[in-house]
Amino acid sequence: MQEARDRSLTDNSIFSIFFVMIMHINSLRVKYEYHLPMHNAARECEIIKRVGDLARQVGANPEMVEKIYRLIMDDSKIAQKEEYDRLTV
């Protein structure tokens, strides 16, 4: 029973972290207001390298972590494009 609660707490914690991260990434308004580029390929590469390195340091699978971050970034690009279209109508 305790193990199931621990797993549930872990799942909720992971979801909360992803939710906050995604909301932060998807916030296009600042980029729009300051005329910053919507996408920054160099910054994306830097982030992927950093999280891959962090995964290696803790013994996690860097390829899996990098894939998760790429999925989040790809989804963020779609959300930012939709938000940009709403802001520029």
Image: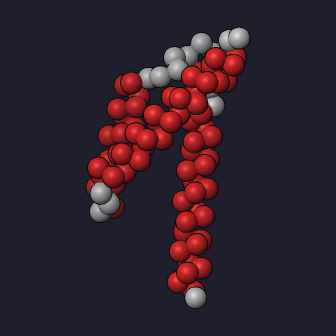
The residue sitting at the bottom extreme is 1
Question: How many numbered discs, if any?
Answer: 0
Q: Position of residue 67 (x, y in %)?
A: 36, 45
Q: Is residue 54 above or below residue 48?
A: below
Please, is residue 25 above or below residue 8 in the view?
Answer: above
The residue under the point 57% across, 53% down is 17
Seen in the image, is 47 located left or right of residue 12? left
Pinpoint residue 38: horizontal percent, then vertical percent: 53, 20
Q: Nearer the viewer, residue 61 or 58?
A: 61
Q: Please give the name of the residue rendered at 61% of the width and 49% of the height, measured from the top-left corner.
A: 19
The picture places residue 13, in percent across and down from the top left corner, at: 58, 62
Q: Is residue 10 visible?
A: yes
Give me the residue at 36% from left, 39% from top: 48
In the rendered structure, the answer to whether residue 84 lies left or right of residue 63 reads right
Pinpoint residue 89: horizontal percent, then vertical percent.
71, 11
Q: In this view of the protein, can residue 57 be seen by the observer? A: no
Placement of 73 over or under 61, stated as above or below: above
Q: Quadrant of the N terminus?
A: bottom right
Instruction: Name the one closer to the observer, 4 or 13.
Output: 4
What colouring does the structure picture have?
secondary structure
Residue 24 relative to residue 72: left or right? right
Q: From this view, report whether residue 74 is shown above or below residue 18.
A: above
Q: Quadrant of residue 43?
A: top left
